[in-house]
Image: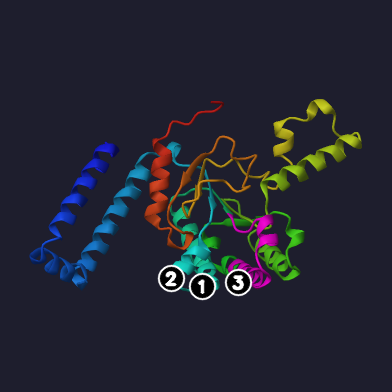
Amino acid sequence: MRRTRSVLGRRLDSLAHWLLRWKIIAVPAAWMANSRMAWSFISRTDRIRRNRLRERVISAGPDMMPNHISMIMDGNRRFAWNRSMQTQAGHSAGKQKLKEVIRWVLDLKIRYLTVYALSTENLISRDKDELDTLFDLYISGLREISQDPLIHENKVRVQVVGRLELLPEKVRRAINETQEATSEYSEFLFTICLAYGGREEIVDAVKEIAQEHASGNLNLESIDPTAISSRLYTSELPDPDLVIRTSGEERVSNFLLWQIAYSELYFSDVYWPSFSRRDLYEAIEDYQMRKRRYGS
């Protein structure tokens, strides 16, 4: 069905390009495309299609809905560069987009959302000015989240994981304030990965196991996948069902390497600030159409 629609779409595109070669059609077409009526029609049509897509996603039933979505928020800088904007503007747009995505996920009653905000590699590769901008955005973003009525109405607990000791003290203070403000909640769990690396997380878990074994508190036979999982930063989380990465890149970039062993991966072409509610629904619908397999 999807292939048939794709073929039909290409044929319609070809027909439209051929017709636009003729001035008698191209001139009124250009006028209509730029008219307020056309944009109103397109906006309304897009909204209708988005709502229908939401209905399809929900109608599949709770068993078909991912319980945990993880997102690699990529493309802030390229979003800005493509619009001849400063990098800071791209990061600011990315912060605003995250607030929208949280709202969309809560609307679907998805209990766990995890986002990749800053990698350990970013701490080394990004210049000081950009990092300072990011740190300021994290502080303001965390404070906005901690005061957001939506977070408190839905009883969302916020946690930040990673090698937090690598972050400036002012960022760690904002993290503590936000975590304390939501510590009593348990309906939803929103996890932000900051100064995070999947390999580093596994190394830290292995070090903890080695110390416990050396001290005699953990015997060799007890070291299994569960023992490692329970010592990860994300030990309170179920493994992600769906991992979404924006910006067209098709790699996981050291994100949740242990946890995504059997996750479904979805790669979106849009930059993170341009990620729309419809893009989220399409990712979930794609997930619902897959037959998940474990071990093969």
- Identity, as a three-letter code, of the amino acid under mark 3: Ser
User: What is the magenta range?
Assistant: 116-143
Q: Residue at x 49, y 63 (%)?
A: 78
Of residues 55 and 209, the one nearer the viewer is 209
Which is closer to the viewer, label 1 or label 2? Answer: 2
Residue furthest front as drawn: 21
- Give the number of the disc on residue 29: none
Q: Is 228 left, or right, of 187 in this rendering?
A: right
Q: Position of residue 120 (x, y in %)?
A: 69, 56
Residue furthest left as drawn: 24
Q: Position of residue 218 (x, y in %)?
A: 85, 33
The correct choice, above or below, for 26 with respect to 5 in the image is below
Of residues 176 and 79, the one nearer the viewer is 79
Label 3 neighbourhood size at 10 Å, few (<14), some (14-19), many (20+)? some
Quadrant of the rendered image containing residue 291: top left
- Give the number of the disc on residue 89: 1
